[in-house]
Image (cartoon, rainbow, N blue to C red):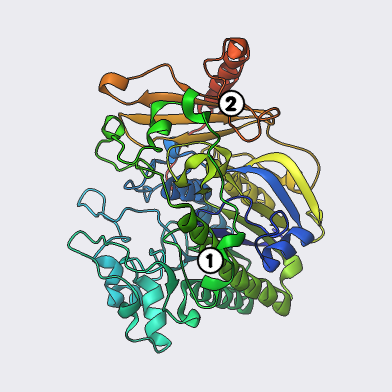
């Protein structure tokens, strides 16, 4: 294969799709705005699952969580599932993962061992000697924590020590017996900016790229940033970059949850009972979402600061590509693993609520001479499409196990390749499981499992006409006038799921 392109995937963690300066005047993201100007921004990009581990595993495998096996937090991507790194590595690519992985749980068992768990996370002697191979990556440098969480360690901690911060533990929380913690700091982080993990991710990404260039090898690098995932915490001056009074929180329209399933409504109670939807695996978001309005504004201001800090370091990577003369030889994609609530619909952070704020993500593609510059597209994209598109871009056949589709024509401006996207969310094995079908103008969410006891399997779901109701306020699930169309959409939904699964033949790596 002659002159295969380099592939640089840059991801953030839990970033709302409208937190780019080109669409939101309240935030400054000059590096990402530059990517938008030099490439194409897709306004309708979706995650395959609004939870970290499942979507990250889908990015890597081109499969939905129901296929690759990592279906919620606490489960693990099996290490024999073939990945993008395996396929690219077999075709001469150097493969590297820098930053957050989160393919494995914090709890390790004999049946399912995990490298991303306590106390392994803080075994720095182990991490100094281990850089892969792992999930198809020849080289990894990873860290699990967000902000000052107790999960700090791995390669990030060894880097801090190598750069003179021997007392780095003072800036992070100490784990308890379970490896968990309570948040001590809020908004302002005393960690010096030069030791922030965004600085580390950028530096190590650039070092990997430079080694690949020196070796004369094409590279696939996943540069995986940790922010703006909560806790809302940033070092100076980024913690005060934005004024809380200038922020505009999302709102709950009066009465909008009246037609929604009960677990939506309970988020607006001070002390809600979510026991009907809970079991062995915890579900993020099943708690009260009530928050003081002024605190929410400060949260948003710091959330924006975290994004601007990350954007600064993304800019360093882009500048280094230019300096090395690799900008025209490199396909760059920026996106996030899932969205985020900042008061939208009365919700905060995340949860099993498939509003656009949660399942829609920012998505930018740049490849000079191949991807139109300055274009904005409303064509549908799914993160499950990344792996097959990268393979096809590299001239490698797409394996039958991959469920995503090649987005190359859409990226090149030749037309849409999808008329729908699918989103899975199997929060619990028995009590909460939902899937969503999105088209250009409509959206249907169906619950396969919902609660137990008094709320066991009610007739509930969400059906939104996005063309008429882009804010998703009017749930038409039980509206008599919408039943015929809901039935047609449900039929298309089932056909889409069958089509995505029926022809796929899973196989182990190397087979």
**Total count of labels:** 2
Q: Nearer the viewer, residue 398 or 264?
A: 264
Does 216 appear above or below 232?
Answer: below
Give percent across and percent down for residue 177: 17, 62
Q: Is residue 269 visible?
A: yes
Side (left or right) of 289 relative to 319? left
Does 335 appear above or below 318?
Answer: above
How packed mark 1 is, by other alpha carbons closer than 10 Å (few <14, some 14-19, many 20 or more), is many
List the residue tagged with mark 2: 474
Label 1 element class: helix
Does 451 appear above or below 224?
Answer: above
The furthest residue to the bottom: 164
N-terminal-most mark, 2 or 1: 1
Give percent across and percent down for residue 163: 43, 87
The furthest residue to the left: 177
Quarter occupied by residue 443:
top right
Side (left or right) of 246 relative to 468? left
- Mark 2 or 1: in front is 2
Q: Nearer the viewer, residue 434 or 210?
A: 434
Give percent across and percent down for residue 346: 49, 41
Q: Quadrant of the N terminus?
A: bottom right
Q: Quadrant of the C terminus?
A: top left
Q: Residue at x 53, y 20 (%)?
A: 494
Q: Nearer the viewer, residue 188 or 278?
A: 188
List the residue tagged with mark 1: 306
How packed mark 2 is, by other alpha carbons closer than 10 Å (few <14, some 14-19, many 20 or more), is many
Label 2 element class: loop
Structural distance between the alpha carbons of marks 2 and 1:
33 Å
Give percent across and percent down for residue 422: 55, 33
């Amino acid at each position: 294969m002659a002159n295969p392109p380099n592939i640089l995937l840059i991801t953030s963690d839990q970033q709302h799709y409208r937190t780019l300066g080109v669409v939101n005047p309240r935030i400054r993201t000059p590096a990402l705005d530059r990517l938008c100007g030099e490439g194409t921004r897709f306004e309708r990009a979706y995650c395959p699952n609004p939870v970290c581990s499942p979507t990250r595993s889908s990015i890597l495998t081109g499969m939905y969580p129901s296929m690759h096996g990592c279906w919620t937090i606490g489960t693990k991507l099996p290490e024999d599932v073939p990945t993008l790194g395996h396929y690219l590595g077999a075709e001469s690519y150097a493969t590297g993962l820098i930053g957050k992985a989160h393919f494995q749980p914090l709890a390790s068992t004999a049946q399912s061992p995990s490298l991303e768990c306590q106390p392994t996370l803080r075994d720095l002697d182990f991490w100094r000697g281990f850089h892969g191979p792992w999930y198809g990556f020849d080289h990894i440098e990873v860290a699990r924590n967000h902000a000052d969480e107790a999960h700090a360690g791995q390669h990030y901690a060894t880097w801090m020590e190598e750069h003179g911060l021997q007392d780095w533990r003072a800036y992070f929380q100490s784990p308890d017996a379970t490896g968990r913690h309570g948040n001590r700091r809020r908004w302002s982080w005393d960690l010096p900016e030069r030791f922030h993990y965004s600085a580390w991710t950028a530096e190590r990404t650039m070092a990997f790229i430079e080694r690949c260039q020196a070796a004369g090898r094409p590279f696939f690098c996943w540069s995986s940033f940790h922010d703006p995932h909560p806790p809302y915490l940033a070092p100076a001056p980024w913690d005060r970059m934005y004024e809380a009074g200038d922020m505009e929180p999302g709102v709950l329209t009066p009465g909008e949850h009246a037609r929604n399933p009960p677990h939506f409504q309970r988020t607006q109670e001070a002390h809600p009972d979510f026991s009907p939807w809970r079991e062995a695996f915890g579900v993020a978001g099943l708690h009260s979402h009530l928050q003081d309005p002024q605190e929410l504004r400060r949260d948003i201001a710091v959330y924006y600061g975290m994004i601007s800090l990350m954007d600064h370091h993304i800019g360093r990577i882009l500048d280094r590509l230019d300096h090395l003369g690799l900008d025209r030889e490199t396909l760059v994609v920026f996106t996030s693993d899932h969205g985020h609530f900042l008061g939208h619909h009365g919700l905060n952070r995340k949860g099993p609520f498939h509003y656009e704020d949660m399942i829609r993500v920012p998505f930018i593609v740049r490849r000079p001479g191949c991807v139109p510059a300055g274009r904005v597209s409303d064509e549908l994209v799914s993160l499950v499409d990344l792996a097959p598109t990268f393979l096809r871009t590299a001239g490698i056949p797409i394996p039958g196990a991959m469920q995503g589709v090649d987005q190359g024509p859409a990226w090149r401006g030749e037309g849409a390749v999808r008329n729908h996207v699918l989103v899975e969310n199997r929060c619990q094995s028995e009590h909460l499981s939902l899937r969503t079908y999105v088209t250009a103008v409509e959206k249907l969410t169906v619950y396969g499992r919902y609660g137990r006891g008094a709320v066991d399997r009610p007739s509930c779901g969400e059906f939104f006409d996005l063309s008429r109701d882009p804010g998703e306020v009017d749930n038409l699930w039980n509206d008599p006038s919408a039943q015929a169309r809901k039935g047609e959409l449900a039929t298309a939904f089932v056909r889409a799921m069958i089509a995505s699964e029926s022809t796929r033949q899973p196989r182990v790596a190397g087979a």
